[in-house]
Image (cartoon, grey):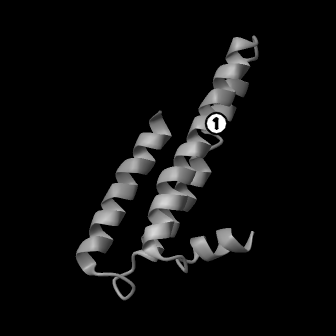
């Protein structure tokens, strides 16, 4: 739990926050959520449960965005790198949210 708190506060180096937490971690959570939703539907479960399973990753996407955003504060990294990381994470979180 301490690692998540450090990530949330932006205390993780940007490279690790972006690649490990954002890209890999976000992808794994999103895929798991989608697979769970498909499994619910495939087994005849109610649509609302499948939708809830799919939407379960959305709060995590917000955590990813905030953690990477805070890790890319200008006093920690160059301004151009911070802007690219922030833009890329916004695009990634949007993609994860709809896939």
Residue 82 place in picture, x, y as percent: 32, 73
Q: Residue at x 44, y 49 (%)?
A: 93
Please tell me in which quadrant of the rendered image residue 40 appears. Answer: top right
Residue 22 place in picture, x, y as percent: 49, 57
Residue 73 place in picture, x, y as percent: 39, 80
Q: Is residue 56 left or right of residue 44?
A: left
Residue lying furthest left: 80
Please tell me in which quadrant of the rendered image residue 88 appears. Answer: bottom left
Q: Residue at x 45, y 63 (%)?
A: 18
Identify whether 37 is placed above or below 8.
above
Please tell me in which quadrant of the rendered image residue 80 appears. Answer: bottom left
The image shows a total of numbered marks equal to: 1
Q: Residue at x 64, y 28 (%)?
A: 35
Identify whether 30 is placed above or below 50.
below
Q: Is residue 30 left or right of residue 53?
A: left
Residue 97 place in picture, x, y as percent: 49, 41
Q: Residues within 10 Å of mark 1 (few under 14, many from 20)?
A: many
Q: Residue at x 57, y 61 (%)?
A: 63
As helix, strand or loop, the secondary structure at mark 1 comes to helix
The residue tagged 1 is 33
Q: Which image quarter is the N terminus in?
A: bottom right
């Amino acid at each position: 739990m301490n690692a998540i708190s450090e990530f949330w506060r932006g205390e993780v180096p940007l490279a690790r926050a972006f690649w490990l937490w954002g890209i890999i971690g976000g992808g794994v959570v999103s895929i798991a959520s989608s697979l769970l939703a498909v499994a619910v539907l495939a087994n005849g479960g109610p649509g609302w449960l499948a939708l809830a399973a799919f939407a379960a990753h959305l709060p995590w996407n917000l955590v990813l965005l905030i953690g990477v955003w805070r890790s890319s504060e200008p006093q920690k990294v160059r301004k151009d790198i911070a802007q690219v990381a922030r833009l890329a994470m916004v695009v990634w979180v949007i993609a994860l949210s709809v896939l």
